[in-house]
Image (cartoon, rainbow, N blue to C red):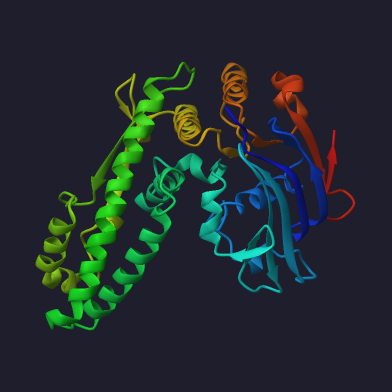
Amino acid sequence: MGALYLSHLTLSHFRSHKLVRLDLDARPVAIYGSNGAGKTNLIEAVSLFSPGRGLRRASAQEMARRPEALGWKLHGLLNTPTSTHEIDITSEAGAARQVQIDSKSVPQTALASLVRVLWLIPAMDRLWIEGAEGRRRFLDRMVLSFFPSHAEASLTYEKSMRERNRLLKEQVRDAHWYAVLEKQMAATGAAIHANRVTALQRLAEAQAGAETQFPSAQLELQQSEGTMPETEADLLEAFQESRFRDMAAGRTLVGPHRSDMYGMYADKGIAASDCSTGEQKALLISLILSNARALAADIGAPPILLLDEVAAHLDAGRRAALYDEICALGAQAWMTGTGPELFADLGDRAQYLEVDDTTGGSQVQIK
């Protein structure tokens, strides 16, 4: 199996980092330093080499180093199983991000054809007990890793739904105003749902076939009310039939935007929301690893993994098991923690970065 990794990364005026240049190999990257030193800023930069707004979902302006706010630039050398590509991502003084691959300007979505990046961050630790929106976003990141076209379908659906909701709020009753929008929503909504169902099947297969110390998560899609129409024709009919109810609510009440991901600790038969904090974290790690295994089978290389403060809530045994699984997978996993002792079980299987901010601004040293 080949490798997918960044062999070089440069950050310029990004977050707390004025200038960082890193030359790396395909091994995991263990990043340690005190809280607030700038560790997460490093892996946020890596997350921007995939489509979307990155692991913090921040605007380009928020990523600029303060107080200069001059704009920022990321440069990476991406190695895939078949080729090597130079990727430049820039934002000039708060302007929208611009992406170049091998010196050619491309839309962000073009990154999906080259690289897959999965991440797990502390904000996700409460995924099972908070609102459905966060679970949908988590699910759709996994779906996107299998189906790069999922991003475009989601954007088209959301745009059409916003227009439909505007008509509903304005109490527009003429069916002709809704026809084109609902047809577009039905086509993209059915595709979104089908992608989600297939992705959950792939995750279930990857979990079932793995020898792992992390618990298997049984997942299913649920609607906030009723059932999700699965075909384009059924979804179109549902939009048409629900217009007057939706008009009363001022928003669209049926569709993939109303889906939720329900999780269960399979071996115990306990809802993920009722599990302990440590079990909930272990379930999330299990899903990320399963996603990575399934992708490796698809594209011939494991995805790049970003695991922020991954050791939190894991005992020493599970922490060592996680490192063993990452190394067996062959993934370049960027992991953060407060001290080097958290990564001791990795030994020479990893490369190490120390992040320090005692001199004003983040400094990164390869150890």
Residue 331, quarter of picture: top right
Q: Is residue 298 left or right of residue 315?
A: left
Q: Farthest residue to the front: give it.
A: 82
Residue 282 visible in this rendered orientation of the protein: yes
- Image quadrant in which the C terminus is located: top right
Residue 162 image position (x, y, % from top left): 32, 72
- Above or below, comparing residue 4 to residue 93 in the picture: above
Q: Residue at x 31, y 53 (%)?
A: 192
Out of 214 and 290, give the one closest to the viewer: 290
- Image quadrant in which the N terminus is located: top right
Residue 150 image position (x, y, % from top left): 39, 53
Out of 82 and 35, give the one closest to the viewer: 82
Residue 181, quarter of picture: bottom left
Residue 148 image position (x, y, % from top left): 44, 51
Q: Residue at x 33, y 23 (%)?
A: 266
Q: Residue at x 73, y 64 (%)?
A: 72
Q: Is residue 149 left or right of residue 195?
A: right
Out of 295 and 248, give the one closest to the viewer: 295
Q: Residue at x 71, y 25 (%)?
A: 343
Out of 338 and 19, give the one closest to the viewer: 19
Residue 91 image position (x, y, % from top left): 68, 68
Q: Farthest residue to the right: give it.
A: 359
Q: Is residue 34 left or right of residue 218?
A: right
- Above or below, comparing residue 262 to residue 329 in the picture: below
Residue 52 visible in this rendered orientation of the protein: no
Q: Is residue 279 left or right of residue 122?
A: left
- Above or below, comparing residue 239 to residue 304 in the picture: below
Residue 269, quarter of picture: top left
The number of numbered badges drawn on the structure is 0
